[in-house]
Image (cartoon, rainbow, N blue to C red):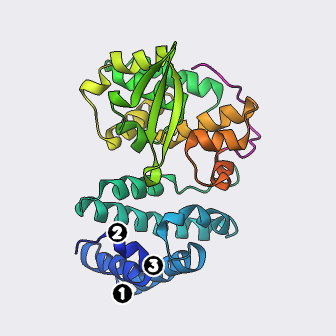
Amino acid sequence: MKITEDILKEPDALIDAFADWLYLHKANSPSSVQWKRYIIRKMLIDIMDGDPRNYTRLLPFIRSLEVDTQKTYMYVIRQFYQWLASAFREAGNLQLYDEFTEFAEDIRVPRGSKRPQWLTIEEAQKLLETAKEERDPRKYAVIKFMLSTGLRVSEFVSMELTDFKKDGHSYLLRIRGKGNKERILRISEDLYKLLVDSGWFNKKVHRRTIHRWISDIGKKIGIDVHPHTLRHTFAHTLLERGESLAMIQALLGHSSISTTGRYVRESSAEVMLGRDW
């Protein structure tokens, strides 16, 4: 069945719809569906106050679990958000499709020896160097732009030329973020020209293609990287440059400073300085 945005206000109906999908489209056994219902109900009702858009509240709880239990919960929660994304895409609600797709991609709980979710200086530079060698100039332009602005991939693909306004030797970029909230970023003239000259606005691609571009280039240099890694790297760079959490929050478009704190937690790895990529 097609769902509407109203179902997000009815957690019981949402859980029932997810269970029906598991039965009908994933051929899950009754016991498997019951187990997944239990996990989603616990997460949705007890942790997120019934609203799946409060997914950032999940992470502190999941971090308190044993590692094996974490993996189980993460698998089910990611499947739940992937289903939500596909359901809203089918319903024609592309805003919620993008939002829940991003949630599914961002559900990660680094523990133990797992590497931080940002790039070191050398990794970021190597990623850019490798992207520059690609035949399609858009790949390099996309990676450099996202690394330099910290945009969500959904925000990047929705940009239009009319969102840029010349202001002296730089440009003001109007971003429409989550919840249709707007923010303004100042970018250099060189960065603007790089993106325009690459042909991006003449031939855009879907966010999935950008994800594949970045992932494939990362594999060439032996690192696991995705669009949100660039966003984390941007935030971590600003923190190490001495910017306040409040400033970083505004630039990233976070509604809560606690979310920003997730992006810039201390790392035992190499300290990054603010850089002109």
Circle 3 SS class: helix
Discs 3, 1 touching: Cβ within 8 Å: no
Q: Which residue is mark 3?
A: 36
Under mark 3, the amino acid is Lys
* Residue 211 visible (yes or no): yes
- 149 with respect to 62 (left or right): left
Q: Residue 5's mark?
A: 2
Foreground mark, 3 or 1, reads 3
Q: State the separation of the CA atoms marked 2 and 1.
A: 27 Å
Foreground mark, 2 or 1, reads 2
Query: How would you rate the neighbour count of disc 2 (Cα within 10 Å): few for under 14, some for 14-19, many for 20 or more?
Result: few
In the displayed structure, 52 sits above or below 271; it is below
Under mark 1, the amino acid is Pro
Residue 2 image offset from top left, x and y in percent? 23, 71
Q: State the separation of the CA atoms marked 2 and 3.
A: 22 Å
Under mark 2, the amino acid is Glu
Circle 1 SS class: helix
Picture mark count: 3
Q: State the separation of the CA atoms marked 3 and 1.
A: 10 Å
Query: How would you rate the neighbour count of disc 3 (Cα within 10 Å): few for under 14, some for 14-19, many for 20 or more?
Result: many
Residue 274 shown in magenta: yes
Query: How would you rate the neighbour count of disc 1 (Cα within 10 Å): few for under 14, some for 14-19, many for 20 or more?
Result: few
Q: Which residues are magenta?
A: 264-277
Please tell me which residue is depicted at 59% across the width and 38% down the height of the picture: 251
Residue 164 image offset from top left, x and y in percent? 41, 26
Discs 2, 3 touching: Cβ within 8 Å: no
Q: Nearer the viewer, residue 140 or 76?
A: 140
Q: Quadrant of the C terminus?
A: top right
Q: Which residue is mark 1?
A: 30
Residue 157 image offset from top left, x and y in percent? 35, 38
Please tell me which residue is depicted at 37% across the width and 33% down the height of the picture: 213
Discs 2, 1 touching: Cβ within 8 Å: no
